[in-house]
Amino acid sequence: MSKLRFIISMSLDGYVAGPQQSVENPLGIGGERLHSWAFELAAWRAPHGLTGGVVNESSAVVERRLTNIGATVMGRNMFGGHPGAWQAEKPWNGWWGTEPPFHHPVFVLTHHAREPLRLKGTTFTFVTDGIESALDQAQRAANGKDVALAGGASAAQQYLDAGLLDEMDLSVAPILLGGGERLFDNVGDDLHGLSLVDVVGAPGVAHLRFVR
Amino acid sequence: MSKLRFIISMSLDGYVAGPQQSVENPLGIGGERLHSWAFELAAWRAPHGLTGGVVNESSAVVERRLTNIGATVMGRNMFGGHPGAWQAEKPWNGWWGTEPPFHHPVFVLTHHAREPLRLKGTTFTFVTDGIESALDQAQRAANGKDVALAGGASAAQQYLDAGLLDEMDLSVAPILLGGGERLFDNVGDDLHGLSLVDVVGAPGVAHLRFVR
């Protein structure tokens, strides 16, 4: 069965993006520090078209997370750019340049209809009829593989609240952001069966893996 | 040098106590789930006067945390009972019965003066002139050993903000509480030099150790 696997980095104070997110600063003030542990990894750099990098205890975690993913779902805020309707001329095309790192179909949750965006190796499909439709489309596109939920917080909260997350890979960055977008706001006290099954310590990060 | 070592359990959504704390329910709704991982340990049960219990990956963590502690500092809310002035007759004497588990001097931060409370093995001294005075008194009482900061959130925030924490042992419980007392509120984005140095995974918990 195709699983929905949520993968995210969070600060000690619970934020997945810092304060004052903008087009110029999509992760908010300090938000890039959430991912410092990843940027130096060869296992992260290769799929992003970068050479070099190190191997450490995070490497196997990152490799496992990238394995058997056939499609990705993300929220509009993570696809990013700006809120509201798409601009008719030169609509926002994502943060990822001409060749996004996904290399599989990506489904973007949005209230604003838009034709699919075809870039090298990745097509973004814009889904306006809800999280279950997006998951259903992604699972069919994944062709037997799993679906990654890439965030952001609002999309994650909706899938968690609906009991649709099969796995959660939470990388806790040992930093405070002091404000921004909180991952676990608005979800009450129910993890919907997700249990901690593995903990990995690595330079600058603690990886917590949950499954149900 | 006598270090100040902060030791606490926190939920995934950042709470160190659940909602609706009261005299009857000092940890708030669901708050005891923060400590489920500890209650079953022989290493936790013995100092609390209980027999039995298991040994697992948490055992060495708990034993290390209890080692070389000569005094404890805690906030009034953790000493607990009720806010405001102490009742003249039958003042609140803590949650710990006639023989508290500390077996060393404990210093309670409060705005309300009170004579020391002497119980079997533990004397509680009530400090009204601030966190630095409490730390100074505790370090002298610790007689060369370290001082434990036991919480709660408000006391921890004050010591963190003042740059006085030398170590932080954070046990992340894989649960949501959905409300309550947040550990890292009101402290901005500065860990004051505390760096992650060790991560231990154990049944039902991830232990993150910070030092500076």
Image (cartoon, coloured by chain):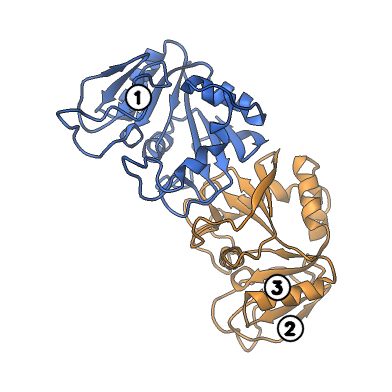
Chain colours: A orange, B blue
Residue A122: image x %, image y %? 80, 73
Rendering coords of residue B102 (x, y %): 42, 20
Q: Is residue A51 visible?
A: yes
Name the residue that disc number 3 marks.
A135
Q: Residue furthest left?
A: B88
Nearer to us of marks 3 and 2 is 3
Q: Are marks 3 and 1 on the same chain?
A: no
The image position of residue A33, as x and y in percent, is 61, 50
Disc 1 marks which amino acid? Answer: Gly
Query: Dot 1 corresponds to which residue?
Result: B97
**Label 3: element kind:** helix
Residue A116 disc label: 2
Q: Is residue A49 visible?
A: no
Q: Amino acid at mark 2?
A: Pro
Tell me the crowding category of disc 2: few under 14, some 14 to 19, or many 20 or more residues within 10 angstroms, Cα based.
Answer: some
Task: Tell me which corner region of the image, top left, top right, bottom left or bottom right, holds residue A73.
Answer: bottom right
